[in-house]
Image (tube, rainbow, N blue to C red):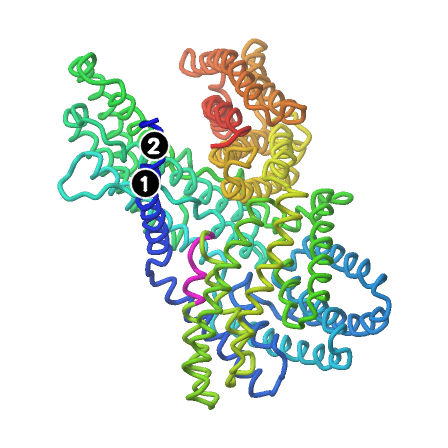
Amino acid sequence: MTGTTTTLVGTPELRPAQTYRWVERLGSLVVRELAPSPRKFRIALRMTTIGTVGAALIAACHVNNELGTYLVWLLVGAGPMMSVRRAAMLLALLGIAAAGSVVMARVLAETPWLMLPYVFIMLAWSTYLGNIVKLGAGLLLVQVVALNIYYLVEFTPGGIGWFASGAFSGSTIALGVVVVFDNWLWPERGEMLLMESLGESVGRVRRRLRGASAYYLGFGGAAPPSLPPPTTDLPRHMALLDQAVVEGLDAYRHAILVAMITRAARISLEVDRLMIAARERLPSHIRDLLQVEIQAAVDAVADVLDEIASELPKQISVGVDSPPPPSRIRARRAMDELSARIIEVRSKYIGHVKAAEIANLAAFTDSLATVTGYIERLLDGPPSAGTRANPNVVSRNQARGIDQKLLLYSLKVGLCGVIGYVIGLLSQHVELSTILTTVLITALPSYGAAFRKMVLRIVGSALGGVVCLLTIIIVSPNFETLPAYLIAIFLIFYLSAYSSLSSGRIAYAGKQIGTTFALVFAGLSPSLDIYAPLWRIWAILLGSLVVAVIALILWPQYAGDSLLPRLRQVIADTLALAPGGAASTSEDTINQVNSETMRILAQMLEIADDAQMEGRTSKVNHNAIVEAAGTLRRIANRLASISSSRIVDPTPPLDEKTEAAREAALGNIQHQLKRWLDFFSGPESLTAGAAQALARKQLSSPVEDPLTLFGSRLEENEFERIKFWTLDQRRGVLAELNSLRRIAVLLSDLNASLARIPGMA
């Protein structure tokens, strides 16, 4: 009884400490995300300038519509640079949608039993079609205007025509301003922004590595490393990659950027593991023996990361088979010296220190060795730069039939929209139209993505509401001129834009601050209605509740559901790229299929981030997805290179035994990939035990034996068998041997990664 009483009384005493740690982590997250950088200052100023100029023009033209300034802010920084052609297309779609909605709203206003199914069909159809043609923010623009018309017809049927014309006029000004800035006054291309963001990401990883190692080695004054960030920079990088693709990025460059994004993500994940090992409070007997070598290895790796971070804004070096730069040779040498030193001093600590300290050293040095493996060579690129097609074009050309996953998602959006529409009508409050906008924004394809968007929208709207109330209290009673409100909106937009340039952890919340302000102060004039921001926050909560019930509870779609079809497609395409495969018939086909593989691998990286947000509800391990995507990409590129080489520079046949060993090595590689394809197509595709059993079976039948025979027969008697071949033919077969050897190593990594995909991290 005494023990029980002590426990019950003692438990609440832990809560303040736990709360403090939570607040501390939140504070460190915000500080890290909002850390200043020249890129953020520049882009935030650009976004703010466009938003302020657009808002001023809308006010000057007397466009009396609450969506005017909102539409400007919606389009600023929301996607790729706006071309004249794309703007004209969006404006035409918006005009058709607005005019059609006015007509249909009047027709259906008296028959609500027809209005609801019509809204459902309209939402589902537009979501499906908009995602197929990748309208991006333009889809939201069209849907928001149309849905507001169907909502307002129940409250102000005589005003929907004025609303539609005001929304169209505001959209015309907004699109015009964005087009002028994007194409002539101040363009910022997605590819350059992505490279700058990657450079900053690698730079942050370098600082985390140095800080964690300083604490691990016990340097005086070194603070303990913080817990690794809850998510990665992947959302930001993938959004910028999608932006670059829409702007016309070719398939070859797309593959290079996917490779760099994958490498940056893998390095970041491994440094996170290293930080966890460094945080453990254990005796330092072994570390004292290895301090010099560990520090030398850390310094060498950090130098390479610094070199990559400095180079990234300008270029990405490619050439995995080229001699590595001196800095990377030094990193490999330092890591080898550390490994040798560990073996040398092992007798001094075995039996004298606890197992926990030995395991901690192994975890730290293994992570350091893995990072070294990622950076010791330059990136591997696709087989050739021959294709310059846009990745989206390739994808659309290969599309067949209806996308079942996208169709189900569109139906889910339609259902959420209808429920939100009914709630708004039953409330008898016209201000609750924001419920519909919230549904459109937060009802995303996967559980993790929807959950993140809901949280960030609620937080951003609450902060935006506070800013609006402060503006109403301070600015509205004291200022009435347009310049005063332009200064106010400039300051709020700059705060919002700067916050939105962080990673996916808080970016949307930052953008939402400006959105809320734009809706309340749409006319850049005094607003004394303190209830408007409060009603909008309430509407956002209701809309989020609708999406939470439908998308997170009744009809959840987890990252694993989206992953498996893509994973199967990538493995199948990788098999098709191998010599003798379906895609190895011509160089153009190889380039197209390889480009499609890179595109799907990019989607897998997005799924990995959604899986991380799903937490314990996820069926898949987000870390393993990132690692598997990186390894599959490298295997696909190697096999594509072998097939391209056989087409461009075919080699004479070797003797029967050598050719048999050559084909057996390739056949073993294909056999292992085929086993994984069959596994992920079967009923146990998300069963961890079955995946691990297959991985063990794969590792017990390595591909090295025929490969070793092939290499030894080529090399014997100083390459006697190929001495009469041309230089290009000799170079081709030796490059193929090198690629097969590298694939054999990569297959071991792939088996380990694929085996860990089923289950949480």
How many numbered tags mark residues here? 2
In the picture of the structure, the residue carrying the numbered disc 1 is 14
The answer to whether residue 467 is left or right of residue 27 is: right
Q: Residue at x 59, y 44 (%)?
A: 447
- Circle 1 crowding by C-alpha within 10 Å: few under 14, some 14–19, many from 20: few
Residue 28, percent from left and from top: 32, 51
* Mark 2 crowdedness (10 Å alpha carbons): few <14, some 14-19, many ≥20: few
Q: Mark 2 falls on what kind of element?
A: helix
Q: Position of residue 583 (x, y in %)?
A: 66, 33
Extreme residue toward the top, this view:
657
Residue 732's place in the image compared with 509, above or below, is above
Q: Residue at x 59, y 30 (%)?
A: 643
Q: Is residue 499 magenta?
A: yes
C-alpha gap between disc 2 and disc 1: 15 Å
Residue 412: x percent and y percent?
70, 50
Q: Amino acid at mark 1?
A: Leu
Disc marking residue 5: 2
**Start and end of the magenta stretch?**
496-504
Asked if residue 203 can be seen in this view, the reply is no
Give the residue displayed 55% in from the left and 57% down from the top: 243
Q: Of residues 56 and 660, which is closer to you in this image? A: 56
Q: Nearer the viewer, mark 2 or mark 1?
A: 2
Q: Of the residues shown, which amino acid type is indicated by label 2?
A: Thr
